[in-house]
Image (spheres, grey):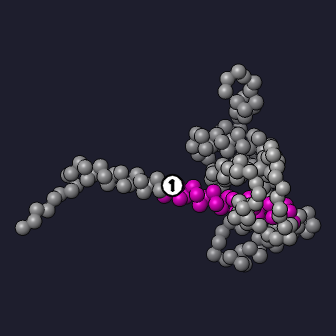
Amino acid sequence: MKLILDLSKNNDYRSWVKELKQRYLSARLKASIEANRTLLEYYWSLGRDIADKQYANTYGSGFYKTLSHDLRSEMPEEKGFSETNLKYMYYLYRLYSQLIENRPHPVDDFRDKNHPQGVDDFKQQNRPQVADDLLKEICSIPRYHQRTIIDKCKGDAEKALFFVRKVIENSWGRDMLLNFLSTDLYERQAKAITNFS
């Protein structure tokens, strides 16, 4: 007769199960962050396409309505292509492109203006690694946080990047981000002249 162990009372076993749980939760969080980053990079590239094609300027406010309708018709099971979301994709690109595309040592981008480009096309272009890293950093925070920063920073890319980095550094939730956006934290910390790093 085999002895059946009661593993629920074994400390090593219980410790291992807790470790497995933590590893799983960590892996799930990493996957979620990576999925969010990839989606935001797509939104950034769609915003770039809108800016490049300038359809919004040509066709007026009806452009976003038409594009929203057409994308939802092509992908009826997908969400996130409302007129408002499409505008925020453009705003995301417009805000951060100042930092990404105006890099210190620009390299010629051999882009075919008639060829729509996606995230993979952006990554494969002849761009310094620092631009890719910056885009990855910008896209590392939740979409809601990004929209809030876009609304509150009013086109100030340096200020927006400051808050993106603060969210990452301090793991700020929605309420904390809103709290610090409504104060003069950026003016106090980022623009302060000091002898300290």
Image quadrant occupied by the N terminus: bottom left
User: Residue 24: image x %, image y %?
Assistant: 42, 57
- Taking the spot 25% from the left edge, 49% from the top edge, the residue there is 12
* Secondary structure, magenta segment, majority class: helix
Is 36 covered by the magenta stretch?
yes
Residue at the extreme right: 58
Residue 93 lies, with reference to residue 187, above or below; the image says: below
- Give residue 79's quadrant in the image: bottom right
Q: Is residue 140 left or right of residue 104?
A: left
Instruction: Characterize the local packing of mark 1: few (<14), some (14-19) or many (20 or more) Cα atoms within 10 angstroms.
Output: few
- Taking the spot 68% from the left edge, 76% from the top edge, the residue there is 75
- Taking the spot 86% from the left edge, 62% from the top edge, the residue there is 52
Image quadrant occupied by the C terminus: top right
Residues in magenta?
28-53
Nearest the viewer among 114 and 90 is 114
| Count of numbered circles on the image | 1
Which residue bears the numbered disc 1? 29
Q: Is residue 112 left or right of residue 77?
A: right
- Taking the spot 46% from the left edge, 53% from the top edge, the residue there is 26
Query: What amino acid is at disc 1?
Result: Leu
Is 116 covered by the magenta stretch?
no
Nearest the viewer among 196 and 83 is 196
Q: Is residue 185 visible?
A: yes
Residue at the extreme top: 195
Q: Is residue 84 visible?
A: no
User: Residue 150: image x %, image y %?
Assistant: 75, 49
Nearest the viewer among 57 and 106 is 106
